[in-house]
């Protein structure tokens, strides 16, 4: 059993919103996660409460240059990335979904791989802020959220992973059998809870936040 985040200190905690972009959330998007789209209202309310409680919020956006110079192997993995119809830097598709738009002054970290820590300045920013705990929300549960949670743990941050403010999509059979979004999501949460993070629901996380007077009050 990994560590438990029983009390969350807002001054030393950041909420990371992973890749809640139009290309992953908006109706008709080729890479859309219906599960992630469905939890947008809950995540929006959670972000509002986090801000009210003094928890910083930082966003990530998965983007690639149109010339493919930062593509790596993604054009072999995802056809909408290969044909430049999704996740093109500077396009409307990579903008944060409007219902979750960053507040003034909040940063959006551009990343080119699953993990928000890989070849970005995220760790530099978090250390400048004195952060010791990160809360993970967004999409997809098993890829970008999972990779970011793992890298956060590798960088010695305590990780809270929100089970009802993350989401993914159905997986087709590519030789190992198909999995529904619900199956992928649950399997990932089980793995993370054992090896990487304190997995909890958003309301439980908010109830653990320490108030300015040091008390823990319900959300």
Image: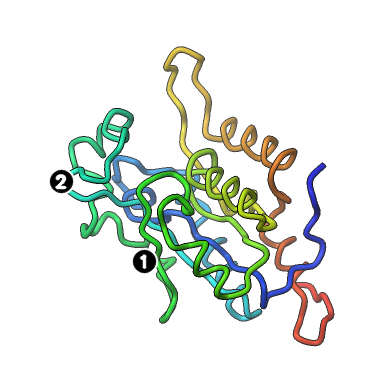
- Give the camera-side residue of 126 and 219: 126
Residue on which disc 2 sits:
67
Q: CA distance from mark 2 to mark 1?
A: 27 Å
Relative to 8, 21 lies left or right? left
Q: Residue at x 80, y 54 (%)?
A: 4
Relative to 63, 123 lies left or right? right
Outermost residue toward the left in this view: 67
Residue 11 at x, y percent in the picture: 67, 78
- Give the camera-side residue of 23 and 18: 18
Q: Which dot marks residue 84?
A: none
Q: On screen, 64 above or below 142?
A: below
Q: On screen, 194 above or below 55?
A: above
Q: How is the image coloured?
A: rainbow
Query: At numbered mark 2, what does the secondary structure look like: helix, strand or loop?
Result: loop
Residue 19 at x, y percent in the picture: 42, 54
Q: Can residue 152 be seen from the camera position used here?
A: yes
Residue 125 at x, y percent in the picture: 50, 69
Q: Can residue 49 be seen from the camera position used here?
A: no
Q: Quadrant of the C terminus?
A: bottom right
Q: Residue at x 62, y 61 (%)?
A: 134
Q: Residue at x 41, y 66 (%)?
A: 99
Q: Crowding at label 2, few (<14), some or many (≥20) Cα neighbours within 10 Å?
A: few
Within the image, what quadrant is residue 105 found in?
A: bottom left
Query: At numbered mark 1, what does the secondary structure look like: helix, strand or loop?
Result: helix
In this rendering, the label closer to the viewer, 2 or 1: 2
- Give the camera-side residue of 195 and 85: 195
Q: Residue at x 44, y 75 (%)?
A: 106
Residue 89 at x, y percent in the picture: 24, 55
Number of callouts in the render? 2
Relative to 105, 30 lies left or right? left
Residue on which disc 1 sits:
98
Q: Quadrant of the N terminus?
A: top right
């Amino acid at each position: 059993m990994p560590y438990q985040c029983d009390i969350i200190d807002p001054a030393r905690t950041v909420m990371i919103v992973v890749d809640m972009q139009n290309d992953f959330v908006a109706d008709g998007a080729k890479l859309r996660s219906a599960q992630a789209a469905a939890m947008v209202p809950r995540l929006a309310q959670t972000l509002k409460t986090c801000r009210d409680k003094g928890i910083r919020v930082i966003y990530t956006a998965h983007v690639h240059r149109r010339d493919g110079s930062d593509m790596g192997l993604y054009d072999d993995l995802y056809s909408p990335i290969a044909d430049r119809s999704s996740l093109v830097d500077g396009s409307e598709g990579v903008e944060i979904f409007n219902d979750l738009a960053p507040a003034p002054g909040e940063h959006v970290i551009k990343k080119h791989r699953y993990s928000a820590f890989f070849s970005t300045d995220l760790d530099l920013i978090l250390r400048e802020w004195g952060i010791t705990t990160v809360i993970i929300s967004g999409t997809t549960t098993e890829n970008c959220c999972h990779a970011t949670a793992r890298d956060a743990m590798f960088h010695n941050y305590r990780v809270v992973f929100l089970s009802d403010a993350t989401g993914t999509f159905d997986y087709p059979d590519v030789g190992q059998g198909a999995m529904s979004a619900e199956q992928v999501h649950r399997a990932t949460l089980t793995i993370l809870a054992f090896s990487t993070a304190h997995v909890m629901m958003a309301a439980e996380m908010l109830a653990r936040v320490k108030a300015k007077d040091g008390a823990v009050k319900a959300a």
